[in-house]
Image (cartoon, grey):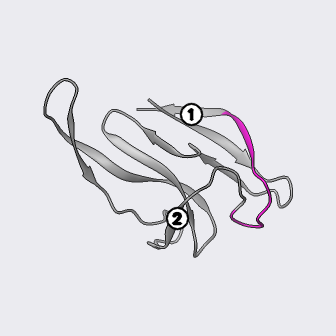
Amino acid sequence: MGSLRTYSCPDCEYTAEVSGGKDRGFIAFTETVECLDCHNLADVGVGEVVDKTSENEEEIRPVHSRCPSCGSFNLKPWDGKTCPQCGGTMIKGDVAILWD
């Protein structure tokens, strides 16, 4: 089960509801990324379970994602703390949503 948290920057008031790193549900693998074009944070799909080969092993297909805000492929994994808008320090908030 994955979770989304609210992250906020006290310097510029930018907020994002993201997992804050790598996460996964039953079939989807996600990662929080920073778009280097629009400077937003987003959780994007990075893989999906194609088939369960056994009870403990899964075949995973990588997924190449775009920024949901601007459509760019110019993404990098987010470091979990730096505001993509102003470079300040983001504050990790409470869990907002649990997802599968």
Q: Nearer the viewer, residue 95 or 55?
A: 55
Callout 2 secondary element: strand
- Pick out the residue farthest to the right: 11
* Position in image of residue 77 (x %, y %): 53, 58
Give the side of residue 50 with respect to residue 29, left or right: left
The circle drawn on residue 76 is 2
Which residue is more in the foreground, 71 or 21? 21
| Left/right of residue 48 with respect to residue 34 in the rendered view | left
Rendered position, 2 above or below 56: below
Is-magenta flag for residue 85? yes
Reading the image, the residue beneath label 1 is 97
Point 14% across, 27% down: residue: 54
Q: Mark 2, mark 1: which one is toward the viewer? A: 2
Q: Look at the magenta stretch and give its main secondary structure.
A: loop
Q: Residue at x 63, y 34 (%)?
A: 96
Residue closest to the eye, 26 or 71? 26
Range of magenta residues: 84-94
Amino acid type shown at disc 2: Lys
Q: Quadrant of residue 35?
A: bottom right
Left or right: residue 52 versus residue 6 is left
Q: Secondary structure at mark 1?
A: strand
| Up/down of 69 relative to 44, above or below | below
Image spot of residue 53 (x, y percent):
13, 33
Q: Amino acid at mark 1?
A: Ile
- Image quadrant holding the N terminus, namely top left
In the rendered image, the vertical position of residue 91 relative to residue 39, given as above or below: above
Q: Residue furthest top?
A: 55
Choose the circle earlier in sequence order: 2 or 1: 2
- Where does residue 76 sit, x and y in percent of width and height? 52, 64
Mark 1, residues whose alpha carbon is within 10 Å: few (<14), some, or many (≥20)? few
